[in-house]
Amino acid sequence: MRLHIVGKLRGKRVFGGMDQTICRDFAELTRAAARSEPDHWAETAEGRMALLIALDQFPRSLWRDTPLAYAQDIKAARLVIEGVANGHFAAAKPWEKLFYTIALYHCEGPDHLERLTRVEELTEVIIAELPAHLAHSAEVLRGQNARGRAIITQFGRHPHRKDHFGRLSSAAEEDYIAKGDFPHLPKAE
């Protein structure tokens, strides 16, 4: 199954438009990961990548617009931190390393800005490893990080998650939400 996850997603557009595929093909795996059943996958670099995707990306599709979409964020962030320390991050291909940075960015908490600094450092590693034909992606990645940092710096959290957690929003957060210019979505032209 570990090879299946990474293999099935390799070369496909993972961000957006994949909800149906994830819900159809990976719903049970996503539930199993939430129950910690495949935690032993983290013993290898490829297994850690598959588990990271199952904990961070798949819940956002399977449980979209519910608190369950974010319930595994802390565990995914821990997997990233461990994977950077033990060499699994270094073993990943540049596009796979993006899943590490995304998981750190997704996880809210009091150390969010510190983790964003780590995201920026890891992004520079990714950029240095990009093949020449993808070098233009460097500024896109940096820009995405800057947008995310600005939001977390201003609000200390992802304001658009308010309804999922029953949180009250400040007037500034409500203005931000009304604009709909979220870093996880393509910028409106």
Image (tube, helix red, strand yellow):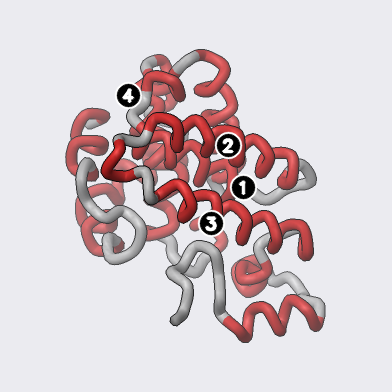
Name the element at disc 3. Answer: helix
Local secondary structure at mark 2: helix
Residue sitting at 49 percent across and 62 percent down?
184
Three-letter code, disc 4:
Glu
* Residue depth check, mark 1 versus mark 3: number of the one nearer the observer: 3
Residue located at (44% from left, 81% from top): 189
The earlier-in-sequence mark between 4 and 3 is: 4
Q: Amino acid at mark 3?
A: Gln
User: Distance of mark 1 from mark 3, alpha carbons?
Assistant: 16 Å
Residue that mark 1 sits on: 107
Q: Is residue 119 left or right of residue 59?
A: right
On the image, the x and y values in percent for residue 142 come to 54, 50
* Residue nearest the observer in this picture, 140 or 118: 140
Amino acid type, residue under disc 2 in the picture = Ala
Residue 87 point in image, percent of width and height: 47, 15
Q: Which residue is mark 4?
A: 46
Residue 169 found in image quarter:
bottom right
Give the mark nearest the N terminus, 1 or 3.
1
Mark 3 lies on residue: 144
